[in-house]
Amino acid sequence: MAKSALQQIREADLHARSAELVVDGQSLLIGHIHIHSVEPILDVRMESGHGLALGMLQLGDDQWPVYCLDGNLDILGNVPATRRACVLLKSDHGGVGILCDEVRVVDNTALRVVPVPGCMSGRQSLMESLAVIDGKVTCVLGTDRLSDMLQSAANTEAAETGAQPFEEG
Amino acid sequence: MEDCKAWMVPLRGKHRVAVGELELVHVLPDPPEMFTVLKAPRHCRQVFLWEGHVLPIFDLSQWLGEDPRSDDNAHLGVFRYRPGPDEALRYGSLIIEGAPRQILVNDSQGCDLPADQESWRQVASSCFDYGGRPVPVLNLQRVFDFAL
């Protein structure tokens, strides 16, 4: 079925912008197309029992596991006082919520995207590219890779502790 | 036997490597502003902007097993290489220690790679003897284009 004009405009808009997430002073870019919504941290139900997720966020009928990462993208077991927003990220493997300090909208025309140098990529790499903006270089996060990393970490944790493995929204 | 020009590049930990005469393009007098690429390998976690290019900073000494450098006052050499005959030049940087020196080399100096570091086989295309010590010749494409 052909896309409606409104759908096409909406998709073009999604591709035209990125979100800049700031976590512990570290900036990360994510294409708008990968973002479901940004929610206040107060809406996150912090509770244990969800593996490495610190809590859940309910949106309609869907439950999104929420994770807290540090500026090196390592999973934290607590929430630093600077975290204010929860970004819900879509991926091929479901969705996750990530707590961050700030979220800003970036116009993609202000970006120059370049590949991650081959020597910096590898199995652990979470970046799908780099972006130059205002004379600075920022990482562009791959949401599928982030989701894989969380899943892998959760499965390792579950194997070690017998806890509940990864769950997705 | 014909001599050719090369650059001898000193690295931390008394390592030294050689590159072709045209492969070393710049030695930065001061450390540039560096940006961290999260979850990148420890020996190659930062990039910087140089003439519009985003260049990886590769610490070959750390990759060879030396301790990580303790500060951000790295001296950087900018290198260029061409991945294939019809491909555009690419650039990368190595952390160096001291000024590179231009030398003359010929085929009679060919020797085996340093025996104490098997890792050299991954990044060196050949080796020559200089002053009684082996000097690996870097394959820059292997250094900068592949995850080691």
Image (cartoon, grey):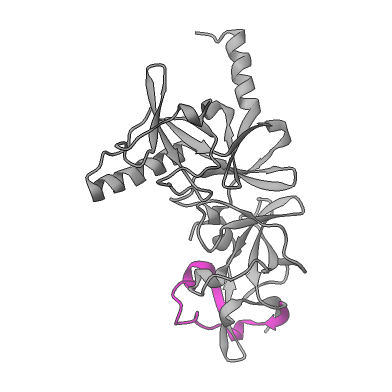
- In the rendered structure, does residue B114 fall within the stretch colored magenta? yes
Going 33% across and 43% down the picture, which residue do you hit? A154
Left/right of residue B129 with respect to residue A112 in the rendered view: left
- Picture coordinates of residue A30, whole percent (x, y): 57, 35
Q: Is residue A84 magenta?
A: no
Judge from the rendering whether residue A46 lies leftward or rightward of residue B27; answer left or right.
Answer: left
Residue A98 visible (yes or no): yes
Counting labels gives 0
Residue B115 found in image quarter: bottom left
Residue A127 position, x and y percent, is: 53, 44
Residue B83 percent location from the top left of the image:
61, 56
The residue under the point 75% across, 50% down is: B52
Residue lying at the far left of the rendered structure: A162
Quadrant of the image containing the C terminus of chain A: top left
The residue lying at 51 percent from left, 73 percent from top is B67
Residue for point 57% across, 47% down: A24
A71 is higher (above) or lower (below) than B96: above
Direction from residue B111 to residue B73 in the image, left or right: right
Which residue range is magenta in the image? B100-127
Q: Residue furthest bottom?
A: B132
In screen coordinates, is A96 left or right of A116?
left
Q: Is B40 situated above or below B127?
A: above
Viewer-proximal residue among B36 and A65: A65
Residue B135 visible here: no
Say which quarter of the image contains residue B102.
bottom right
On screen, residue B6 above or below A9: below
Where is residue B113 shown, x and y percent of the image? 50, 79
Choose between A108 and B91: the one closer to the eye: A108
